[in-house]
C-alpha cells in the first residue's frame, strides 16, 4: 500500500512519488520542465548512443533466436482485469484494457480498481509453464498499458502493483525469473505515449481534474525512468514492445530509443514512433495476405476478442483456427504473438488453457514444421500451407495439409526438385511420391492424422526449384487478375489502400493515398499486344492512373461510374508486351489527377486471339 509518509501530491496532481529522492528528482524535472529542452537535456544524460552501426551479421545474430522461435505469448493484464472491463455493471465497448477511456472514468475513481488488484491465484512458474507447454518460446507482457498503472515496482510513481495494490508483489520480477528458469525469452509491452493517469500522458481527455503538463515532461519523469528500470532490473530482456506511438518530440523519442542500448541484445518492434522500423514490423489482429518485403514481421492477436480480460468476451478462436493461423503466418515468414488475458485472480479462463494445451499437443508432434522455418517457396497451395527449412544438402518442405485429398493424391504444383523422402510427421508413415506433369505427387493415406493440420515432411535435393506458377493468359489469351491476388504496396493499414469487400467480392479500396499502388506478378508466354480493361468503381468525376507491364505502359483516364458501389468494366487501351517471361503488372495513381477508385480486377486479353485459337 502507498506509504502515507510519501511526498505530498503536487497541485498539478502529478504521479505520486515514492521517496524524498524521487521527490528531489521530480523537483529537478519540474524546474527543467520549464525549459523547452527537458528531454533534450535528459537525452544528453543517456549513455553514448554514438556506437558503430550494427553490421548485417551482428543484426542477424541478435534476431536469430526470434526467427527460430516463431511463436510467442502476449499477455494483457492490469487493473482492468479486476472488473473484466465492466464499469458500474455496464459493458463498455471495445477491448477491456480501454475501459477507463471508453467509460470516461476519472483517475480517482479508476484508482479504486487498482486498490482491489489482488491476484492471489497467480503463480508465475505455472503461468510460464502454460506458455512453454503450448510451444511458445517468448512471452511479452504489459508492464504499463495506457491506464498508466505499473505492473512492476516502479520507482517513478507509487501508482504500481507493489505500492498501490493489496497484492504488493512485483509481477514482472516473478515472471522474469520464471521465464529465465524455463528457458523462455522475456519481454515487456510498454505504452510509451498514452498514459491516462499522468498529466502529461496522451489520451485522457475526459478527466477535467488533470492540470496538463507537456508530454515531454511525462516522458522525462515517468516513461524514461520506468523504461530504464525495466531494462536494468529484470535480467536479460528479449523484446521491448512499444505501443501506440503519438506525436513525440525528437528529444523524447531519442531519450526513449537510446535506453535500448542498456540491453544490447534486446529486440524492439516498430511502434516507438511514426516510421520507426524497429527490428520487426507488427500486424495486429489480422494476418497480412502477403508478407512485407524484406523485413521481419509478427502478427499479434488475442485468443478471444479482447486483449485484456473481458467478462463478456466469449469469442474464443477455435484451436483449429489458432493452429492454422500459426501455419499461415509461418508459411509467409512471420511470427505469431498470441495474446491471453489473465483475470483479476491471476489465472487464465479454462477456454484459453484448453486451447494452449491443444496447440501444445500439436506442436509436440509438428513443431519442427514451425520453428526456424522460412516462407513457402511454392506460394499458397490450394490444400493448405507450406513452410521450409534447409537441412544438409537439401530442403525440408513441410506441407501443412488443411484439406486432405479425397483421392489420396496430394500435388505440389510447380516443384521440380528430386525427392529424397516423404513422411507424415504424425506417426512417421513413409509416403511414396512421383513426378507428374504439374509437379510432385505424394500418395497419402485415406484419412489425415490431424483434422486441423496434418504435416508431411517432404525432403528434396538442393534448394527449391519451382516452375513459375504465376498467373498466365489461357489458351484464349485472356488473363483475369483479381484484387485478392494483388500485392498492395504501402498497405500500412486503414490509412492506405487495402483489400475490402463489396457484395462479397474483393476489391482494392480506401485508395486515398496516391502513393499506394497495386501489383500482380504474371507470366507471359505469348508476347504481343494486350488489351487492358478493369472492373472498377469511381465516385468522383474522373480519375487518372497508369497501367504498366514491366517497361510498357498506358495512361488511363476513367470517368465516374456514378458511385463507389457501382462497378463497371472500363476499356483502358492496349499495351505492347514484346518478350515472354515473368512480368510485373502495376496500377499506379497519377498524382494530381488521381481520385480514389475501387478496383475489383484487371483483365489482359491478347489481341488477335479468338476462343477458337
Ligand atoms: O491500444 C492498444 C491495445 O489496447 C492493445 O494493447 C493493442 C495490442 O497490440 N495495441 C494497441 C492497439 O493497436
Image: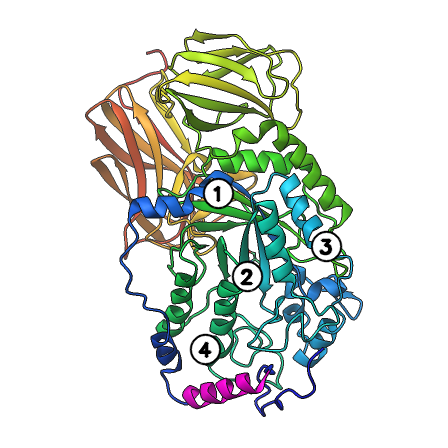
- Disc 2 target residue: 234
In x, y percent, where is residue 96? 68, 61
Mark 1 and mark 2: Cα distance apart in space:
34 Å
Distance from the alpha carbon under mark 1 to that under mark 3: 35 Å
- Magenta-drawn stretch contains 32: yes
Residue 441 rendering spot, x and y as whole percentages: 49, 11
The answer to whether marks 1 and 4 mark residues whose Cβ atoms lie closer than 8 Å is no
In the drawing, what numbered circle is on residue 288?
1
Magenta segment's dominant SS is: helix
Who comes first in sequence, dot 4 or dot 3?
A: 3
Q: Can you identify the residue that label 3 sits on?
A: 123
Residue 149 is drawn in which quadrant?
bottom right
**Which residue lies under the disc numbered 4?**
220
Q: In which quadrant is the N terminus drawn?
A: bottom right
* Mark 2 CB within 8 Å of ligand 1: no
- Total marks placed: 4
Asked if residue 333 lies left or right of residue 393, the reply is right
Badge 1 marks a residue whose secondary structure is loop
Disc nearer the start of the sequence (4/2): 4
Disc 2 on helix, strand or loop? loop
Decide: few, some or many residues near mark 1? Use Cα within 10 Å; few <14, some 14-19, many ≥20: some
Task: Choose the circle earlier in sequence order: 1 or 4.
Answer: 4
Instruction: Tell me if residue 262 comes above or below residue 106 in the rendering.
Output: above
Tell whether position 375 is magenta: no
The magenta-colored residue range is 19-33
Residue 255 showing in the rendered view: yes
Pointer 4 residue Cβ closer than 8 Å to ligand 1: no
Mark in the foreground, 1 or 3: 3
Q: Which mark is residue 524?
A: none
**Ligand 1 in which quarter:** bottom right
Expressed as whole percent of the image width and height from the top left, the position of residue 29 reads: 46, 85
Asked whether the viewer can see residue 75, the reply is: no
Amino acid at each position: 500500500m502507498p506509504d502515507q509518509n510519501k511526498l505530498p501530491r503536487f497541485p498539478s496532481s502529478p504521479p505520486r512519488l515514492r521517496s524524498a529522492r524521487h521527490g528531489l528528482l521530480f523537483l529537478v524535472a519540474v524546474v527543467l520542465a520549464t525549459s523547452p529542452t527537458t528531454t533534450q537535456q535528459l537525452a544528453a544524460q543517456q549513455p553514448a548512443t554514438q556506437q558503430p552501426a550494427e553490421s548485417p551479421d551482428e543484426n542477424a545474430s541478435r534476431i536469430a533466436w526470434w526467427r527460430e522461435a516463431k511463436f510467442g505469448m502476449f499477455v494483457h493484464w492490469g487493473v482492468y482485469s479486476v472488473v473484466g472491463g465492466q464499469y458500474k455493471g455496464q459493458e463498455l465497448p471495445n477491448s477491456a484494457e480501454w475501459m477507463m477511456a471508453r467509460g470516461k472514468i476519472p483517475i480517482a475513481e479508476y484508482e479504486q480498481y487498482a486498490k482491489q488488484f489482488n491476484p492471489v491465484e497467480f503463480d508465475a512458474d505455472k503461468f510460464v509453464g502454460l506458455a512453454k507447454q503450448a510451444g511458445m518460446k517468448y512471452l511479452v507482457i504489459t508492464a504499463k498499458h495506457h491506464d498508466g498503472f505499473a505492473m512492476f515496482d516502479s520507482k517513478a510513481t507509487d501508482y504500481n502493483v507493489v505500492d498501490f495494490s493489496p497484492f504488493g508483489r512485483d509481477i514482472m520480477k516473478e515472471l522474469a525469473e520464471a521465464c529465465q528458469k524455463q528457458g523462455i525469452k522475456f519481454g515487456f509491452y510498454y505504452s510509451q505515449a498514452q498514459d491516462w493517469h499522468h498529466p502529461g500522458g496522451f489520451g485522457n481527455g475526459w478527466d477535467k481534474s488533470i492540470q496538463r503538463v507537456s508530454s515531454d515532461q511525462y516522458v522525462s519523469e515517468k516513461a524514461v525512468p520506468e523504461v530504464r528500470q525495466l531494462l536494468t532490473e529484470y535480467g536479460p530482456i528479449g523484446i521491448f514492445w512499444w505501443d501506440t506511438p503519438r506525436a513525440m518530440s525528437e528529444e523524447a523519442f531519442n531519450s526513449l530509443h537510446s535506453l535500448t542500448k542498456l540491453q544490447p541484445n534486446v529486440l524492439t518492434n516498430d511502434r516507438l514512433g511514426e516510421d520507426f522500423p524497429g527490428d520487426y514490423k507488427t500486424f495486429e489482429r489480422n494476418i497480412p495476405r502477403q508478407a512485407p518485403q524484406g523485413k521481419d514481421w509478427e502478427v499479434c492477436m488475442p485468443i478471444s476478442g479482447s486483449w485484456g480480460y473481458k467478462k463478456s468476451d466469449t469469442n474464443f478462436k477455435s484451436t483449429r483456427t489458432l493452429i492454422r493461423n500459426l501455419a499461415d503466418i509461418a508459411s509467409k515468414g512471420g511470427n505469431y504473438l498470441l495474446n491471453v488475458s489473465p483475470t483479476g485472480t491471476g489465472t487464465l479462463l479454462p477456454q484459453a488453457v484448453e486451447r494452449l494445451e491443444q496447440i501444445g499437443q500439436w506442436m509436440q508432434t509438428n513443431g519442427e514444421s514451425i520453428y526456424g522455418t522460412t516462407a513457402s517457396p511454392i506460394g499458397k497451395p490450394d490444400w493448405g500451407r507450406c513452410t521450409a527449412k534447409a537441412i544438409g544438402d537439401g530442403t525440408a518442405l513441410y506441407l501443412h495439409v488443411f484439406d486432405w485429398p479425397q483421392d489420396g493424391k496430394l500435388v505440389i504444383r510447380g516443384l521440380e526438385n528430386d525427392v529424397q523422402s516423404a513422411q507424415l510427421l504424425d506417426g512417421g508413415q513413409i509416403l511414396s511420391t512421383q513426378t507428374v506433369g504439374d509437379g510432385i505427387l505424394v500418395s497419402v493415406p485415406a484419412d489425415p492424422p490431424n483434422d486441423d493440420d496434418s504435416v508431411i515432411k517432404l525432403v528434396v535435393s538442393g534448394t527449391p526449384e519451382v516452375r513459375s506458377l504465376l498467373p498466365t493468359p489461357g489458351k484464349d489469351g485472356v488473363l483475369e487478375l483479381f484484387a485478392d491476388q494483388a500485392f498492395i504496396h504501402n498497405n500500412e493499414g486503414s490509412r492506405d489502400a487495402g483489400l475490402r469487400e463489396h457484395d462479397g467480392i474483393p476489391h482494392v479500396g480506401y485508395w486515398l493515398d496516391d502513393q499506394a499502388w497495386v501489383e500482380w506478378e504474371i507470366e507471359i508466354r505469348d508476347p504481343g499486344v494486350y488489351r487492358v480493361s478493369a472492373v472498377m468503381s469511381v465516385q468522383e468525376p474522373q480519375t487518372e492512373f497508369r497501367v504498366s507491364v514491366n517497361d510498357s505502359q498506358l495512361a488511363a483516364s476513367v470517368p465516374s461510374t456514378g458511385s463507389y458501389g457501382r462497378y463497371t468494366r472500363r476499356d483502358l487501351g492496349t499495351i505492347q508486351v514484346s518478350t515472354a517471361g515473368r512480368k510485373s503488372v502495376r496500377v499506379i495513381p497519377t498524382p494530381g489527377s488521381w481520385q480514389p477508385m475501387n478496383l475489383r480486377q484487371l483483365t489482359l486479353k491478347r489481341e488477335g486471339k479468338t476462343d477458337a485459337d
